[in-house]
Amino acid sequence: MIKKIPAAAIRIGMYVVDTGLDWAEHPYLYAEEGEITSKDQTTHLLDEGYLDAFIDTDRGSYTWNISTNKRPEEQVRDGVIGDEHGRYKPAVPMAVEIHRAKAVYDESLAFAKDFMTSAAKDGKVDYDAAEGLVEEMLNSVTRNHDALISLTKLKSFDEYTFTHCINVSVLSTAFGNYLGLSPQDLRDLGAAALFHDVGKSLIPPDILNKPGKLTDQEFTVMQKHPQRSYRLLREKKGIPKRILRGIAEHHEKFNGNGYPRRIAGDDIHPFARIIAVADVYDALTSRRVYKPPMMPSKALTILYGMRGKDFYPGKAESFIKFLGIYPVGSMVRLSSKECGIVTGSNPDAPLRPSVLIAFGPDMKPISKRQLDLSEQNGNTPLEITECLDHEPFGVNPGDYLQQAQ
């Protein structure tokens, strides 16, 4: 199980995990992967100013007082099972909505390129043009949120600066819809998420794209991007204050260790609480120049480890249940050794989504069959045993989502 702990609590024998989170946005997170072998290491990382680290309790020689034989995914499932939201049923089948969702995503991506370029060039953002796109996103997630969400992980090109804006808006809007927000709340949330990082267009590229740790001076510059986003949008008269707060506060943390204002708890706007979770999830699961994408199931265990610290209590748990521990578009192996693509989420049963089984144990194509893992009969129902990276197998999950029933 992966958990986040204070740097001062790190002990010899604990195994540190490198999550791949951006140095620029998480400068106080110690992420040199491997087992802690000496007291000098713990002293050094504290002297360097690190505040937190992710620890894998299943690795290393440290003895944890944890008694469980459950897989990490099962532990997360047990932690979110009490969430009150659920019973999601799409209004439109995946195979129908995926085509409309792709048109919405592609249009939104083109707009993101335009507004980020415009902001960098002349410090202006066309907010009015965004309203129609956010409305189209809202319509798509209302019909079938799995379709648009699946596209956030199926883009093969490396345009993270632009896709991240769209992905966070899609995830935030769909999550807000799951939480029961009103249509107007969702429009404003979607707009805040869309523009949450526009201020990065004003950060010098050598800082923004630096692969290693930022200096204190560089991080001070990076910390200003939420405020710069806020100021760019504030230039447009009439934008609701809650949109501006969602933008300005998305890097604040529940425990008060965020930035730029270090506010905490209930002082953080509800929009920012949602955007914060979507922002970290997309960062973990996106391919970057310096890292491969993390498997969604692992990323969600990391989000779970951040609950109540970085994220407002209940938000990470609800997000995991909403998305499913194996999100739509994931390639998975079943207990039968067959493999398939997740085509539908089941919030009431996060470990048992709907799967299109398409490959035998040897990864050769077989006659496809659709199976909802939450609606099986018999004494030995199939279950997911692992999440796979589809790229080494040359599989495009999008091709299979179009065939989902």
Image: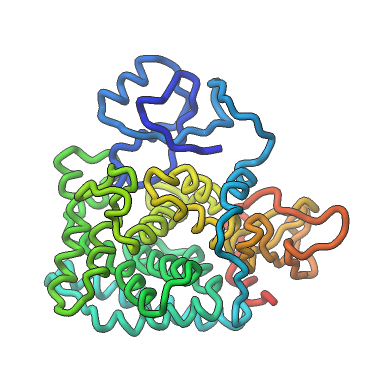
- Measured as percent of width and height from the top left, residue 272 is found at 32, 60
Horizontal side, residue 218 vs residue 289: left or right: left
Instruction: Answer above or below: position of 371 versus 253.
Output: below
Q: Nearer the viewer, residue 298 or 346?
A: 346
Residue found at the very far top of the displayed protein:
39
Q: Nearer the viewer, residue 359 or 166?
A: 166
Q: Residue at x 56, y 57 (%)?
A: 83
Res 35 seen here = yes
Horizontal side, residue 201 vs residue 43: left or right: left
| Colouring | rainbow
Instruction: Answer above or below: position of 355 versus 253.
Output: below
The quadrant of the picture occupied by the N terminus is top right
- Measured as percent of width and height from the top left, residue 65 is found at 58, 25
Q: Nearer the viewer, residue 293 or 391?
A: 293
- Measured as percent of width and height from the top left, residue 255 is found at 33, 43
Identify the image quadrant of residue 329. Answer: bottom right
Q: How many circles with numbers are drawn on the protein?
A: 0
Identify the image quadrant of residue 167. Answer: bottom left
Horizontal side, residue 127 vs residue 194: left or right: left
Q: Residue at x 30, y 31 (%)?
A: 50
Q: Residue at x 39, y 43 (%)?
A: 309
Q: Residue at x 44, y 66 (%)?
A: 171
Residue found at the very far right of the displayed protein:
379
- Measured as percent of width and height from the top left, residue 119 is found at 18, 70
The quadrant of the picture occupied by the C terminus is bottom right
Horizontal side, residue 158 vs residue 304: left or right: left
